[in-house]
Image (cartoon, rainbow, N blue to C red):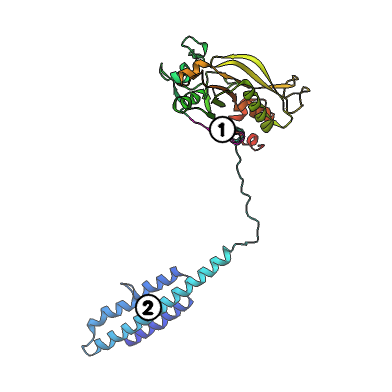
């Protein structure tokens, strides 16, 4: 049996030495040290030995077992190091190689215009006001001097949630809420999405964006309105931009006007952008109607004010030379990358 143990020791050491991977090493472990391994089989055969031989053979088997376990453990560590070196060589990263180009996004044209307009009016001392897009009809219409029989309240023009709740058709309800809760002086702009029952075409959308402005204080006049809009037009569209007023009607302002700006592309000579007219319609404006001030708890005999509002899409289309509003909503990356 001693000879058998010697042969097992020599054979196992040779196999461990030439072993090439951990799978093969594990097979060697099972072959010699497993429950059915060759060395274990020697222990099971010790019953046939004499009482004097058993301790000698048992001690020899344990000695060989410990030696083999040590050799297997050393070989396992060696194989792991070899595998690591191989992986490092294969997976080596060349840090001098240029990295993949990361495509950065950009602000949407609508967001760009809103940010620019906010920056201009913040510089003139205005505050930014916000309000709900799902609005009570009393704020969307009644407080703004728009009676129940006004065409703007027709179901064909306004999205109704209930008889008393609508999707706001302008950001003017924000002005009404501010006037109701704050005392003059008031200087605010109200940017945000608005909703009207319009069919989608090159110049219309049922969802678009507005920026409205409101100033309420003592001795506010039409000249203050025109000076404010001239300052805005020059900052937004260029220092040579001129502005003109045309008489108009809005239920919440009196007097009211449409404001045009000289074409910032041709300087008023006439071109494709301004359709040969030299002027581009920019916004609606006027002096806040006394009824609106009363409805919001402000004394029109003490205070006056002006208001204005324009579509952000209109500014974006004019400034960027966009001819179809739908391009602003279709999210075509090829189009948006231009901005």
Q: How far apart are marks 1 and 2 (CA)?
A: 82 Å
Q: Residue 69 carries which label?
A: 2
Q: Which badge, 1 or 2, comes first in the chain's sequence?
A: 2
- Using the rendered image of the protein, determine whether residue 269 is visible from the camera's viewpoint: yes
Residue under the image location 40 percent in, 18 percent down: 162
Nearer the observer, 262 or 30: 262
Q: How crowded is mark 1: few (under 14 residues within 10 Å), some or many (20 or more)?
A: some
Q: What stretch is highlighted in magenta?
A: 118-130
Left or right of 23 in this view: 339:
right
Left or right of 84 in this view: 276:
right
Q: Name the residue under label 1.
A: 126
Relative to 148, residue 126 above or below: below
Counting the numbered discs, the total is 2
Residue under the image location 49 percent in, 26 percent down: 174
- Most distant residue in the right direction: 269
Residue under the image location 65 percent in, 56 percent down: 98
Element under disc 2: helix
């Amino acid at each position: 049996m001693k000879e058998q143990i010697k042969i097992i020791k020599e054979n196992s050491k040779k196999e461990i030495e030439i072993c090439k991977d951990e799978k093969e090493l594990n097979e060697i472990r099972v072959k010699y040290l497993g429950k059915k391994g060759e060395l274990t089989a020697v222990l099971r055969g010790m019953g046939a030995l004499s009482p004097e031989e058993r301790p000698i053979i048992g001690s020899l088997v344990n000695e060989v077992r410990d030696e083999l376990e040590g050799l297997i453990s050393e070989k396992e560590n060696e194989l792991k190091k070899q595998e690591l070196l191989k992986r490092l060589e294969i997976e080596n990263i060349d840090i001098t190689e240029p990295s993949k180009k990361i495509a950065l996004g950009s602000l949407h044209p609508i967001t760009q215009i809103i940010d620019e307009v906010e920056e201009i009016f913040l510089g003139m001392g205005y505050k930014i006001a916000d309000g709900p897009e799902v609005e009570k009809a009393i704020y969307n219409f009644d407080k703004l001097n728009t009676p129940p029989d006004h065409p703007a309240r027709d179901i064909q023009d306004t999205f109704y949630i209930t008889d008393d709740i609508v999707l706001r058709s302008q950001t003017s309800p924000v002005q009404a809420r501010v006037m109701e809760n704050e005392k003059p002086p008031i200087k605010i702009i109200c940017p945000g999405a608005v909703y009207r029952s319009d069919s989608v075409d090159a110049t219309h959308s049922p969802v678009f964006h507005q920026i409205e402005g409101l100033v309420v204080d003592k001795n506010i006049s039409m000249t203050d309105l025109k000076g404010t809009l001239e300052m805005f037009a020059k900052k937004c569209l260029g220092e040579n931009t001129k502005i003109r007023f045309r008489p108009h009607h809005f239920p919440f302002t009196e007097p009211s006007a449409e404001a045009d700006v000289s074409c910032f592309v041709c300087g008023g000579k006439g071109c494709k952008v301004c359709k040969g007219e030299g002027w581009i319609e920019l916004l609606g404006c006027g002096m806040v109607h006394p009824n609106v001030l009363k409805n919001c708890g402000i004394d029109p005999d003490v205070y006056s004010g002006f208001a204005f509002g324009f579509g952000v899409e209109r500014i974006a289309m004019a400034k960027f030379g966009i001819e179809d509003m739908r391009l602003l909503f279709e999210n075509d990356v090829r189009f948006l990358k231009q901005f």
